[in-house]
Image (spheres, rainbow, N blue to C red):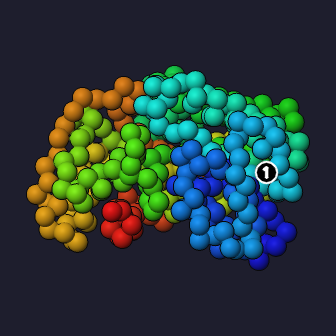
Amino acid sequence: MNDKTTILITGGAGFIGSNLCDYFVGKGYKVVCLDNFSTGFKKNIEHLLANPYFTLFEGDIRSFEDCKKAVSGVQYVLHQAALGSVPRSINDPVTTNEVNVSGFLNMLTASRDAKVKRFVYAASSSTYGDSESLPKTEEKIGKPLSPYAVTKYVNELYADVFSKTYGLETIGLRYFNVFGRRQDPNGAYAAVIPKFVMQFMKYESPVVNGDGNYSRDFTYIDNVLQMNELAMLVQNPKAVNTVYNTAFGERTTLNELIGYLKEFLSGYDQEIKKVEVVYGPNRTGDIPHSLASIDKAVELLGYSPEYSLKNGLREAVKWYKDNLR
């Protein structure tokens, strides 16, 4: 048990954040969840509310006062709070910047003032921008292709400055297309896997942006939990104050993804095999291909991802079948 260690998880009611809350409460840490429920859901953490190791603090990272209160008495911060989605940022760059940049700076400053041991934050593969090199290695990025990508790159720059100027230990985790239990299939900015699953289950034709040959390094949630724990606890000074790709290290086209989804879902409902797919135009701000090198995380953090896309999809489909209606 880790009775004296308290972790603040911002965005703790969201998809990744709520899984982190579960994971660390289960390991005996005290967990404070900060969320304003703009994109997260109370139902994601409801089962934790009676747990003495869990505290919910309803607040907004755009409020410096809320950040100060949330970080009081905390040793580690796992910063997940953000407005995700490239299309959302294109439609509303101002709010995306307020949350992802100003909110991030508030959390960094509050963490510095509270003398937290380490600040681990959700960075993004969108930072690679127009770089065409594959696989993506941490030290070689391109120019951002969306307001969202700009904000996530600015996070990395601020974290680096706070490490050098104030001695705050920071680690950024560049998430690559994370999927799994509790990922929201609804809304205009839903991620592709839960959205497609829900559509297949309703016998609706999913719309693929482009010809389906764009590829992604889809990353199951349990690999992300492992990375956060390794980043939080690593003792090697060379492993701190840097960024890591958080991925499995394989790429899959959207057409291949659809094939796997149909295969796994038709195990529960044969009718899903018959659902046709519709192809539409490419989406503004999308990069054609994404593939992570995980060598740096393997070497410096001891990262060993357990779930390939197919194994993760099997687990996710089971969860979606029972929870998506």
Instruction: Give the residue drawn at x 41%, y 27%.
Output: 285
Tell me residue 318's x, y (percent). 35, 70
In the image, 39: left or right of 98?
A: left
Instruction: Give the residue drawn at x 37%, y 58%.
Output: 309
Residue at the extreme left: 274
Tell me residue 249's x, y (percent). 44, 51
User: In the rendered image, which quarter is residue 232 located in?
Assistant: bottom right
Tell me if residue 15 can be seen: yes
Q: Quadrant of the N terminus?
A: bottom right
Identified by mark 1, the residue type is: Ala
In the image, 280: left or right of 96?
A: left
Instruction: Give the residue drawn at x 30%, y 38%.
Output: 214
Tell me residue 216's x, y (percent). 37, 44
Tell me residue 164's x, y (percent). 82, 34
User: In the rendered image, which quarter is residue 123 located in?
Assistant: top right
Q: Quadrant of the C terminus?
A: bottom left
Tell me if residue 250 can be seen: no
User: In the rendered image, which quarter is residue 124 located in?
Assistant: top right
**On screen, 273 above or below 175?**
below
SS type, badge 1: helix
Residue at the extreme bottom: 1
Q: How many marks?
A: 1
Instruction: Give the residue drawn at x 71%, y 47%.
Output: 59
**On screen, 41 above or below 318?**
above
In the image, 168: left or right of 159?
A: right
Residue pointed to by mark 1: 70
Q: Nearer the viewer, residue 223 or 304?
A: 223
**On screen, 11 above or below 157?**
below
